Every structure is written in structure tokens, then in C-alpha cells.
């Protein structure tokens, strides 16, 4: 069995650090982007978890590994189950074909990585 990695945790931390320079150089743009994300994912007719499942599906379709990491992390925080993610990835694969199934594997790796990190530690 392959040893688990922290690829997506490291990737999201690295991207977040890299975005800090944009927050400094273009504060209004980054603030507006943050507010857009906050508004788009707020509970409404669809709950936040459903919206994050959509965001992860679009991340897979766009083949954006950093996006996959951020949305997988958000789904873990929102209490999504692996089964919910798997079923959403089934629809993503249906709609996106072979390339989506390849990135679906990345989405599962990211979700599992963040879920392991969020799991209570046992002694």
C-alpha cells in the first residue's frame, strides 16, 4: 500500500502563501474575489455543502489541482462524506469523460488527505 502524502495540504498552503502577494498588490481585487466566493457558497436554495460539491466538480472539469485541494478541504469541514464525493465524481466523469476520471482520482486523494488530517487522533 502506498504511504499517504500531504500533497494537497502542501499545495493549498503554498498557493495561499503565494496569494499573499496578490492580496498586498491588488487588495480590492482579492477582497472582491473573497466576497464573491463567500456570497456564492452561502446557504440559500442550495446548502453550502451542495455548492462545494459543485465547486469540486468544476475543479475536476477545469483540471485545477489547487482548486481541487481548496474545495476538498472545504467539503471535509462541511461534513461531506466520501460517498457524497464519490457520487458527485460519478456525475463529473459522466459529463467530462476520460480527462475528468483522471482528475477525479486527484479529487479523491485530496478529500482523503484532508479527512485524515481532520480525523481525531487516537493513541
Image (cartoon, rainbow, N blue to C red):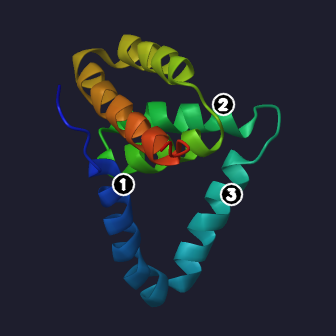
The numbered dot on residue 38 is 3
User: Looking at the image, which residue is at 54% across and 76% down?
Assistant: 29
From the viewer's perspective, is residue 123 above or below residue 23?
A: above
Q: Which residue is mark 1?
A: 9
Q: Is residue 9 left or right of residue 4?
A: right
**Horizontal and vertical percent for residue 62?**
34, 38
Q: Whole-Å distance between the Cαs marked 1 and 2?
A: 22 Å
User: Looking at the image, which residue is at 23% across and 25% down?
Assistant: 102
Q: Which residue is mark 2?
A: 50
Q: Is residue 61 visible?
A: no
Q: Is residue 9 left or right of residue 98?
A: right
**Horizontal and vertical percent for residue 122?**
50, 42
**The N terminus - image quarter:** top left
User: Looking at the image, which residue is at 40% across and 34% down?
Assistant: 112
> Which numbered disc, 1 or 3, marks the residue that appears first in the sequence?
1
Tag 1 and tag 3, C-beta contact below 8 Å:
no
Q: Could you say which quadrant of the image residue 21 lies in?
A: bottom left
The numbered dot on residue 121 is none
- Residue furthest right in the image: 44
Q: Secondary structure at mark 1?
A: helix
Q: Whole-Å distance between the Cαs marked 2 and 3?
A: 14 Å
Q: Nearer the viewer, residue 101 or 29?
A: 101
Amino acid at each position: 500500500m502506498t504511504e499517504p502524502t500531504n500533497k494537497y495540504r502542501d499545495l493549498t498552503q503554498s498557493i495561499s502563501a503565494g496569494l499573499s502577494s496578490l492580496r498586498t498588490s491588488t487588495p480590492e481585487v482579492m477582497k472582491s474575489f473573497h466576497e464573491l466566493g463567500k456570497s456564492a457558497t452561502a446557504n440559500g436554495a442550495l446548502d453550502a455543502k451542495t455548492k462545494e460539491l459543485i465547486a469540486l466538480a468544476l475543479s475536476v472539469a477545469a483540471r485545477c489541482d489547487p482548486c481541487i485541494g481548496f474545495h476538498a478541504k472545504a467539503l471535509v469541514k462541511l461534513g461531506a462524506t466520501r460517498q457524497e464525493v464519490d457520487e458527485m465524481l460519478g456525475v463529473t466523469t459522466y459529463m467530462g469523460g476520460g480527462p475528468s476520471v483522471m482528475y477525479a482520482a486527484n479529487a479523491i486523494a485530496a478529500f482523503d488527505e484532508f479527512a485524515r488530517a481532520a480525523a481525531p487522533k487516537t493513541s
